[in-house]
Amino acid sequence: MKYDKFFALAKEAGIEEAELYIGESFSLSFSLFHGEVDKYSSNKSMTILARGIINGKFGTASCDSWSNAHAKFLVDAIVKNAKVIENTDPAFIFEGSKKYKKMSTFNKELANISIDEKMGKLHELEKLIKEGDPRIVEVAAVEYEESASSSTIMNSKGLKLQQKSNYFVYIGQAVAKQGEQTKSSYDLAFDNDFSKFDVKKLAEKVVKNTVDQLGGEPCESANYKTVLSPDVVAALLNAYVGNADAEEVQKQSSLFIGKLGQKVASKKITIEDKPLQRSVFCRWFDDEGVATYNKPIIKNGVLQTYLYNLTTAAKAGVETTANASRGGGKMGISPFFLALKPGKKSQEELFKEVGNGVYITDVSGLHAGLNPQSGNFSLQSTGFLIKDGKIDRGLDVVTVSGNLIKLFNDVLEVGSDVKVLPSDISCSSLLIKELVVSGK
Amino acid sequence: MLIAPFIIIILQLGCCLYSIVFYLLNIKKGYYVIKFTHFAERRPNMISKKLAIEVLNEALATGADYAEIFYEDSHSYSLSIENGKVETSSSNIMNGVGLRLLRNNQCVYGYTNELTRKGLVSLAQSLRSSFHDERKITVTKLDYTNVKNRNPIKQSYDDISREEKIALVKEGLEEIQKRNDPRLVRYIGSFADNHRFVAIFNSKEKWFKRDTEFGRLAYMVIAADQNGFETAFNGPGCQSDISFFREKINVKELANKTADTALMMLTAKECPSGKMPVVIGNGWGGVLFHESCGHPLEASAIAKGLSCFTGKHGDMVASPLVSAVDDSTIPSAWGSIDIDDEGNPGTKRLLIKNGKLNDYMIDDFNGRRMNREGNGACRRQNYKFCPTSRMSNTYICNGKSTPEEIIKATKLGLYTVGFNGGSVDPTTGEFNFGCSEAYIIRDGKICEPVKGATLIGHGDEILKHIDMVGNDLELAQGMCGAGSGSIRTNVGQPTLRVSEITVGGRGGELK
């Protein structure tokens, strides 16, 4: 076997238990500018993450290709790295779950569709955006990307698991002008079933997102009753649910400390982690090899569980929730597919309930304007004024500020609209009691 | 696993995620840990000149007018120490080749880890299938071009033990520990180093090499009281050896300062909102220029007419007090490069001269649309990224006012000192940046701290509102994410004042 050398060397070096996580992917991408292919790329790549336990401490190392020299590098580095670890958290290499709900959502057909057909749709997308509105002055980019990847875990306890996934995505970005004002926006469509791609629908969304922003002005700085679009909700929800990370809780830096079984959000809010949902996001084992399962994190506003990996679960004396997720040199924790339970009212009905307020469609600069520790955010935003229950004019140069905990407690309604986003989230619009909008 | 590739695509589009991160906020996801150690044999797979010529000629067979091999062998190490205990220690090696073919305004890119003749020739054959023309160029030789090394390393990070790096970081952390303050719930120190060897072979019959090392030390503190959490971060970095951290950085002072900021922000009130005068502190305050003007002046935006500064060369785009530079030649600086990823030497570019738009960051490929040669600004994160025009060390030049004069001349406004980073859409110039530490100025004096301030505006307007420029220029180290991945860049400026900018906060009207 290709990777036996690593396990043999690890044993010789005194590594008690060892594990390899191998990610392999094939990707294809191309983009057009003014009807010509301006970028084309096709790649195969590999990532190997290795860890091993010596005296109860993990050593980690990684590389991007495989040979006996790489196996030797990984083993040497694991030994040296484990030696300096002082953290006394329990370390596990997992022997395997009793049962796995193996699922395959890999779509073999995607690779059989010709590049000409994929390129043809891209030309169509560019043309449809360009012709979509006289105010569209430029199609900044249209791009296709497809990826097929596999993740394999193998360890010295005999566990070997592999899951595969693939997807394609079309993206379009347009620039619109009116007088001195320039606006740009983009949208994307993704799936792994090519027959589901609707080029007209995507082009219409790109055009609408872009031209709708024209004519916007700042609004008065004040508190507004607010509707947040599913995209905005997804961005905020990710940071909010980060508080359920058991490591953050154990390290005393989560806003959910001591809140298990208590109300942390409006009773309208139910959030689940659904790794076994049949979609391109499907994950039937986590990054430690534990069988995943669907679970509510917040039900009717009440916190149901923290999210654990093996180490944090052992420290808390509970079972892991199979949410181990790798980041850097460390086994972190993450939900795999967050689903916000939709409500019954349409977006239009939410606008009616607002009467006079704002509708926020997009936020930027999350890495700079949102502090996941304090939950405070102040974000550059785009959207519209709502007047007499209907969309009025656009908003330009405004920020929306608030606190995540307060925001999710202030939810008056969850919309019936559902949008699945590539950030592994399914979301609906939210009606919020009030948010601070800064403009004039 | 889906997230990463999607993010990359969105970055390539460049529509909304041209961003700079100083503060690797997301400790929740472990992103702040960079990586990496010692590969037993250095450059075991370095390709020969003979093989490079063969691969270039294979690639050029169908009419490409330029071909380039980018070989990379890098190894990195990172560690993190939390509340006194070493938590992670991790090593990484990367070794691969990126191959780029150009034909007029078309670019084809691919990469591989299979560094054998078979692997490289097969990559060249696969990429050239995008073109269907006659061969234009045949490479017969590769001449080595020597490049002056402005960033010498006396002692490689590879030769410094993990224990020594740990001791350095702990020196600062012990200061925080000694305080025994229960509000300091988490204090995290990290150290990361990267040794990167790059060789570039191109169809202009030249080859270059570059061997660089970087180090970065960072402290992050999370403070808590009954009202919630606050965080603070400081992370100096250099393209120099460990002596920089021993001699030029006082790690004890740095750790104390980080803890002080986090504690002080616990007492801060919410920042007022609306339009107001803002004094932006030196160093990291340069995020203002980086986002509002730097990205829109990259050829990747300018060449296609997709920048808010397109067609404005020679126009007044800023106040006459503003001159700004992108300089990749500063010795040992975080963002410096001796040669860029196309083999062009690093240069100093005067972007704005006394308010007038003067120059851009240009790479050879985007330069084709502009009828300009590249000026040494072509960069990429690693061989997995197709390179494009990027910033290096970018800053607003010194003016004549002292920082004290600027504060004194401000009756009512905001003074921002610490920053989290920002982002911009280069097409519209709409930018934002978040402040981690800020104060209210009243009657020319710095008063109470405020939190949660985000500053937003339009790049082609905001620089016109700069009405005072200080004389205390400083540079600060960040990671900049855009079309060709995440790269090291310095931002910088002296203390300056913007007469009016939109501030987002929850504290109501400024009084």
Image: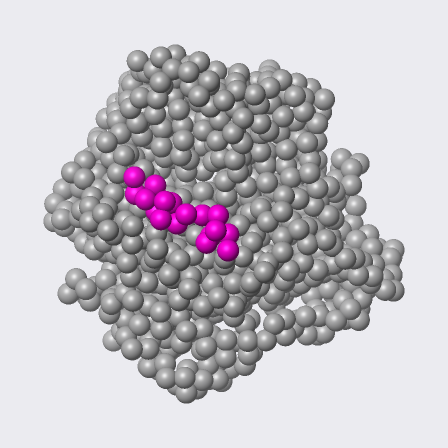
Residue at image position (67%, 24%) is B353
Is B255 in the magenta? Answer: yes
- Part of the protein shown in magenta: B243-260
Is B108 in the magenta? Answer: no
Q: Residue furthest left?
A: A261
Q: Is residue B394 found left or right of A304 in the rendered image?
A: right
Q: Quadrant of the C terminus of chain A?
A: top left
Image quadrant assignment for residue B114: bottom right
- In this rendered view, identify the residue nearer to me: A220 or B260: B260
Position of A211 relative to A243 (above/below): above
Residue A266 in view (yes/no): no
- In this rendered view, identify the residue nearer to me: A414 or B320: B320
Q: How is the image coloured?
A: one colour
Residue A218 spot, x, y in % from top left? 43, 17
Position of A377 relative to B383 (above/below): above
Residue A432 spot, x, y in % from top left? 26, 29
Residue at image position (31%, 21%) is B447
- In this rendered view, identify the residue nearer to me: A438 or A421: A438
Residue at image position (63%, 33%) is B325
